């Protein structure tokens, strides 16, 4: 039985945890190897992974799951994707319809600023202007 040190300096038995890291023969549960941007954190415990799936099944968003488990948002997404659970978009994707375009043009004709129009309708000025250019190009 060979012992090696954990991050806090205490001995760790390879046979006890059975998770020998590739780097330096150190236990992956207690050793964080250096990577670009800092230290790589040890892998999640089976309880934490179970909590990810339990909270996801209960309908919690990935950001709150990440906070509860103590990992990052991409980690939660990665575990769920590996299990075949595909998450939807974070935001809602809407199409710019003629109704929104006409509403924006009416507000602009009333002298409203683009900032007010963007806040009211929820699309940015560039989206409206691109749509207007495309509509004019089709009518020619």
Image (tube, rainbow, N blue to C red):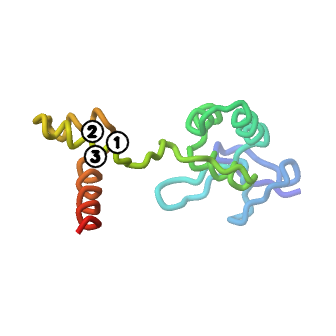
Which residue occupies 68% across, 53% down?
A: 81
- Provide residue 126's location: percent of width, then percent of height: 25, 53
Dot in front, 3 or 2: 2
Quadrant including the C terminus: bottom left
Note whether 90 is above or below 59 in the view shown. Answer: below
- Provide residue 9's location: percent of width, then percent of height: 66, 45
Quadrant including the N terminus: bottom right
**Helix, strand or loop for disc 1:** helix
Front residue of 13/122: it is 122
Q: Name the residue under label 1.
A: 99
- The 10 Å Cα crowd at callout 2, few under 14, some 14 to 19, many 20 or more, is some
Q: Can you tell which mark lies on residue 26?
A: none
Left-right relation of 42 to 126: right
Q: How many labels does the image show?
A: 3
- The 10 Å Cα crowd at callout 1, few under 14, some 14 to 19, many 20 or more, is few
Front residue of 128/78: it is 128
**Helix, strand or loop for disc 3:** loop
The image quadrant of residue 69 is top right
Dot in front, 3 or 1: 1
Front residue of 11/48: it is 48
Q: Mark 2 points at which residue?
A: 103
Q: Do the residues labelled 1 and 2 touch (CB within 8 Å)?
A: yes
Note whether 50 is above or below 139 in the view shown. Answer: above
Which residue occupies 48% across, 42% down?
A: 92
Q: Mark 3 points at which residue?
A: 124
């Amino acid at each position: 039985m060979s012992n090696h040190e954990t991050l806090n300096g205490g001995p760790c038995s390879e046979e006890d945890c059975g998770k020998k890291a590739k780097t330096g023969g150190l236990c992956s549960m207690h050793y964080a190897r250096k990577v670009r941007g800092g230290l790589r954190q040890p892998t999640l415990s089976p309880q934490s992974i179970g909590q990810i799936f339990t909270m996801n099944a209960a309908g919690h968003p990935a950001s709150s799951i990440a906070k509860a488990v103590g990992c990052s948002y991409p980690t939660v997404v990665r575990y769920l994707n590996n299990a075949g659970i595909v998450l939807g978009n974070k935001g809602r994707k809407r199409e710019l319809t003629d109704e929104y375009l006409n509403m924006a043009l009416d507000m602009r004709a009333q002298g409203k600023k683009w900032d007010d129009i963007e806040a009211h309708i929820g699309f940015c000025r560039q989206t409206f202007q691109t749509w207007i250019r495309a509509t004019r190009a089709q009518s020619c």
